[in-house]
Image (tube, grey):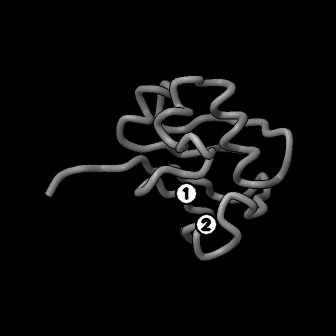
């Protein structure tokens, strides 16, 4: 599955698109595999309770996962997966 990453996550992941082969078919499986591949990513996106940090957003096919099943949202290889970190500015 291809995951598009934005802002400072591009530096952590080494580019705009990351090829991920998750061990399951949920958003959390994709993110867990990414954290395995890029350990620094974990502290950028997860709280200590392993929920997404405030203002970290995951979109599947343009739809925010909070409007679906959050981290339990199922994904397919063909889905467009986008990961956005908190962004400051104005």
Front residue of this view, candidates 38 and 80: 38
Callout 1 environment at 10 Å: few (<14), some (14 to 19), or many (20+)?
A: many
Q: Which mark is residue 44?
A: none
Residue reaching furthest to the front: 49
Q: Residue at x 48, y 50 (%)?
A: 53
> Callout 1: helix, strand or loop?
strand
Instruction: Residue 19: give x, y in percent of width and height.
Output: 67, 35
Mark 2 closeness class: few <14, some 14–19, many ≥20 residues within 10 Å: some
15 to 45, vertically: above or below = above
The tally of labels here is 2
Q: Quadrant of the N terminus?
A: top right
Location of residue 35 with respect to 45 vertically, above or below: above
Q: Residue at x 42, y 47 (%)?
A: 85
Residue 6 at x, y percent in the picture? 42, 44
Q: Quadrant of the C terminus?
A: bottom left
Between 83 and 86, which is closer to the camera in this rendering?
86
Label 2: state its secondary structure: helix
Q: Which residue is mark 2?
A: 65
Q: Is residue 49 left or right of residue 89?
A: right
Q: Quadrant of residue 67?
A: bottom right
What residue is shown at x 85% (from left), y 46% (from top)?
24
- Residue 86 position in % (x across, y down): 36, 49
| Residue at x 48%, y 24% (from the top left corner) | 14
Q: Residue 76 appears at what percent x and percent y?
A: 79, 57
Which residue is labeled 1 in the image? 58
Query: Is disc 2 in contact with disc 1, using a CB cutoff of under 8 Å?
Result: yes
> What is the residue that sits farthest to the bottom in this orientation?
67
Q: Cα distance, mark 2 to mark 1?
A: 6 Å
């Amino acid at each position: 599955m291809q995951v598009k990453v934005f802002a400072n996550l591009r530096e952590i992941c080494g580019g705009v698109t990351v090829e991920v082969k998750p061990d399951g078919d949920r958003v959390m499986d994709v993110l867990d595999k990414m954290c395995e591949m890029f350990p620094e990513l974990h502290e950028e996106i997860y709280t200590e309770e392993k929920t997404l940090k405030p203002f970290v957003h995951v979109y599947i096919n343009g739809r925010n996962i909070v409007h679906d099943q959050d981290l339990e949202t199922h994904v397919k290889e063909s889905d467009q997966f986008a990961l956005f970190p908190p962004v400051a500015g104005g």
